[in-house]
Image (cartoon, rainbow, N blue to C red):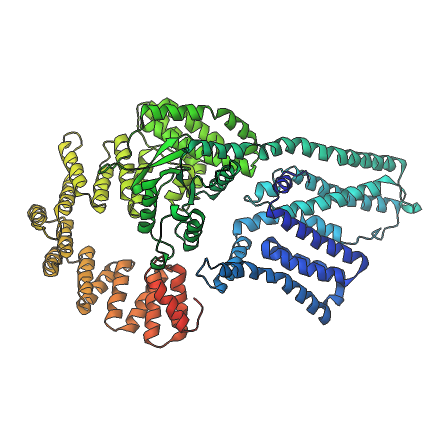
Amino acid sequence: GLELTFWEHATALTGEMLNLLLFAYVIRCVLEYRLDLRDSWLFRMALVYGLAATNNWAMIGFFPGLLIALIWIKGSSFFDFRFLTRMAVFGVLGLSLYLLIPIVEISSGNTSVTFWPLFKSQLLTQKGFLMYAPLRSRVFVCSLTALLPLLVIGIRWPSTFGDTSSAGAAISSLMFKVVHAMFLAACVWVAFDQGFSPRRLGLGLPFLTFYYLGALSVGYFTGYFLLVCGEDPKKSWARSSPGMRLVNRLVAGIVWVGVVAVPLALAAKNLPLMRVTNGPALRHFSTLNEQALPEQSSVILSEDGVSLTLLAATLEAKGVSQRHILVNTQLLPFHAYQRSMARLYGSRWPVVPLDKLKEPIGAIPLLGLVNELSISNQVYYLHPSFGYYFEYFYLEPKGIAYEFKSFPLGIIPTPPLSPATIQLNQKFWSGMKEEFARLAKPISEKLPDAEYLGRVYSRALNYWGVQLQRNQRLVEARAWFDEAQKLNADNVAAVANAKFNENLRSGRADTVQIEQSLLDKLQSYPTWVSFVQICGPVDEPSFCINLGRVFAEGGLYRQAAQELIRAIALKPDNLDARFQLANVYLQGQRPDKVMEVIGEMRSQRDIRPLNLASQIELTRLEALASANPTNYQKAEQLLLDTHRKNPQFEQLLLTLAQIYLESNLYTNALETLDKQLALTPNSINAMLLKSAIYIHTKAYDPALPLLNRVLELDPKNLPALINLGIAHFQSGRLDEAKKDYEALIKRNPNEPDAYYRLGEIAKKKNNSSEEIKNYRLYLKYALPGAEEIKLVVERLKQLNSSP
């Protein structure tokens, strides 16, 4: 009970303690049966084991070991049909608890999902833990001090090993004691959470069952040494010499000392840490959030459910639980959450027409909801963040919280911080240094609460350091980057910012070089956006450019532009960043800003010379910025004039064809592409665009030779393969289309449209089994909100097949 992980969960009364209680009862049933051989113990065990397995995936992993133990103890009588049947009935009765959550969810009326997907999701969650490869290897290491000692304990060893000589008995006894002593030392060592303990290797999972088994082993081995070394053997041939008796007494004395010293040492080691864990740190964090909010009713947004729950508890304790509207933005797209918010906050929550909105709700309706909330309320965010809300709103730091403000009309960059705002935040964070110092030791010991606070504070400090750096407060920024690293050594953003800050203070803006270990940590994040959401922003040119590209790919054009503007400010000679910025403005439908970038680049040609390719790219961007469906003539003339002077640049005519296409001038577009193909017959881009126009105008036959030619030149060209499948399918060539989509799946097994088309082909051929198989694969890989999802689900229901 003094081991740190056990102590944490026991004092917090977590669900892990219930899991451990059920596990301990299963062990007790097995041991009781071993003593009195009453089958009723095993029937109780089967019932409790089934109940435990529904809430604890580890019980599934332990099952083979339990089965072997029962066969070992019970022998051939284990295979008695009546006994096995009764065991199975009790086990299934326990496993019926799997049905509880789906039944409750369906009964609540808050979900449109049917019973089977809810039931299946529980099993898939447990399967995910059991099949997670990094975890399995660590389980094996941890089992060496949990399961392996049990194997030794479970064997009924003979009192002798056949050797009746005094020397032979002494050697056998000594080796046996050495093995037991090694296991005892290893189990005690693990209790202190050293290198190979579950706490160090468990990837954040508690592994209380392993600690429990280790504690049982410590108890057994301690009793063994006290029994064996505490008295001399009765048989004359096994009696020890006076010297050996002295050694036995010494061993027994050491064990007695350990019985007293180990608990005291564990208490001395873990009690201060538990005081921190159960101390005011989380309460203080939540109080700081509450104090940062205005007195009047406000809307509080967060993607972090933990911080919202803590804030709700603080508001409840103060008796003002309804003062603020607390919104979990991760759950906001789901109908059940919208209904629960409407019930909780009544007329204060905007009316959302859920019957007209698909689930998950898209970005535009959600943005409208947040905008409606912001009209009549102050809005705050509990942490720095990024996403589609931040295309229209920005954050202003207010200590640990952030006011959520709408952008002034026409402004792209985030407005600069006022001196008063900087002074307020500097004062707040300076006052937090004592709290950070108190968290240092618990964070190093990997206490979950302390680690959580370390990550939250580290991200906030890194964000604040970036704000200071962007306001030319370099020395102050560096101090907060250092503090952020102390609170979370894995904060790669803070490391990169600290290194780049050194460069800036030295008068350079060179790209930073990060150690391989930190690059590996960076690679562990699934996306750039998730990395920034967890660690905070990076104020360094290459990071800004990469993040700008990611934001642009996600349609977050304002945030993309902000990152690129900062990259240009840090590295004014980076022409690629300027071209990217112009393209972002183009995608964001800000032609005025495109022309600003072009004008700036041309005015600075003496400082930053442009080669011919760059000049052509500027012309292309200018044409696209000046063109619109009703007035394309200026762009047309600009591109044609430039092409006459520089016919070697195919992007000029391709851009002109694109402008014609957007103006629905298909004949002009085709003539322009023919002109380009006359110059460069193997232009893949020209052939792809021309085939796309044919497909758009339903002229499938002329598209086929173009696409086949592209694939001859580039067999891995996915757009050509996709278009070829569309052309074959729409023209009724189903066998050819099937081959195209099967080839596409070989190159990209996660392509949902290929499975959808294969399902459609199977439908036309009345092949129900193929149709069901491909539609299910489509649902597996389809993006949320895709229009075809509803059609596929309805079709599967018609086929009497569960989606």
Residue at image position (47%, 26%) is 432
Residue 494: in sight, yes or no? no
Percent of width and height locating residue 481:
42, 29
- Foreground residue, 717 or 270? 270
As drawn, is 647 to the left or to the right of 369? left
**Vertical placement of 318 versus 34: above or below?**
above
Q: Please state which of residues 12 and 108 is positioned toward the viewer in this rendering.
A: 108
- Residue 240, percent across and down? 88, 41
Question: Does residue 611 sit above or below 684 in this rendering?
Answer: above
Query: Horizontal placement of 736 versus 68: left or right?
Result: left
Q: Quadrant of residue 8?
A: top right
Q: Which quadrant of the rendered structure holds the N terminus?
A: top right
242 on left or right of 538: right
Residue 166 placement (x, y as % from top left)? 88, 45
Q: Nearer the viewer, residue 294 or 103?
A: 294
Q: Is residue 120 left or right of residue 379?
A: right
